[in-house]
Image (cartoon, grey):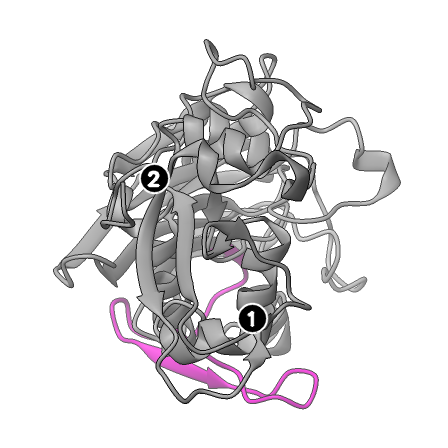
Amino acid sequence: MLGARGWLLPALLVPPDQQRLPTCHGIGGASSPFTGDSVRCSPTMRLHSDAFAVVECATVPPGSDDSLLPDVLRTLWPHRFTSQSSSRKACRRSLVLVDGVVGRSALKVAAGCTLSVVQRVAAPSPGAGRRGRADAQALRVIYEDDSLAVVYKPAGIAVQGGNASQSQQMPLRALLANSLQPSRDAADQPLWRPQHVHRLDRPTSGLLVVAKTGQALRTLSAGFKDRLVHKRYRAVVAGHLNAPKGRTKLIDTPLSGQSAKTYWRVVRRATSDLFGEVSLLDLFPYTGRTHQLRRHMVSIGHPIVGDAKYWPSSLPQDNTRGLLLSAVELELPHPKTGILLRVRTAQPGSFDDIVGYGVSRFS
């Protein structure tokens, strides 16, 4: 009650005449009076809900100069507010209290003031409020715990963005929200919506890592940046690659002025009436440039079958089966335990069922 970690803050700490009315969505779950797509409520309404709690309290040390609230937040909790934008965002979202009153970014804080940080400690059930859509399909979940999930993204779904002609497509965020269970790890800031940590091209299928807590999102994002996450893709390419089966080779060709490296190895080969021969490959991207695998395979004269964007005009083309590229394996340190997590899935059936390309069999 007096700011102990994890206790809900009493509504009376914020006088009615000092309450702002921000827009808040879906607070409290399906049975809450605050659930809805555009419910307007005071900041204290959040604290009536089991979804929010005070998680940090601190007093500005004596002798401190008056400073803007975002700067004080970064000084008191550098581990939580790692940038100016993160501390300002907390103020905008009414998640910071100064002596029990909602603090804003323009507020100057003096020595002796008590600051409290409010955060979400529970996420709603799949599809609740604005977290998902009732008409959204469920994605295939390969792995899931309270910190993260690995889902299978079908080809044709954009991970982010999309043009006007694709506006009718179900957003990935809605699919994720309807497919995953809410995190029960209150200490790690459960996310309102699960958030993908990396991207897959729209025509590429395969494994996608999704964070369910703020802590997992930060740790996983850093892991991708520091190349602690290892990915294996399976692809069918046109032509015969001159390399022994199982031997790993490197493509070290810069893309758009940036260093880009892709390791590859031949898994099997097959004859093809259309292409003469096709090869089944394992691809291991060391860097993560835009369309790296597709551009690298074209650069050595062996485009990925079904690649409408980069396919050479000199080769016969058949896009009836889509892009034969899929992320089939991920290896990463778990964001909470650090234990190595390895997730695999089978290659799509279209890789095996390639009769339409005139392939007799993979050998």
Question: Which residue is under mark 1?
Answer: 69
Q: Is residue 247 magenta?
A: yes
Q: Amino acid at mark 2?
A: Val
341, 357: nearer the viewer: 341
How many marks the image carries: the answer is 2
Residue lying furthest top in this view? 31
Q: Measure the alpha-carbon separation of dots 1 and 2.
A: 23 Å
- Sequence-wise, the earlier of marks 1 and 2 is 1
**Mark 1 Cα shell of 10 Å, populated few (<14), some (14-19), many (≥20):** many
| Figure quadrant of the N terminus | top left
76, 201: nearer the viewer: 76
Residues drawn in magenta: 236-263
Identify the residue at image location x=70%, y=41%. 319
- In this picture, residue 48 sits left or right of residue 90: left
Question: Which residue is under mark 2?
Answer: 121
Q: Secondary structure at mark 1?
A: helix
**Mark 2 Cα shell of 10 Å, populated few (<14), some (14-19), many (≥20):** many
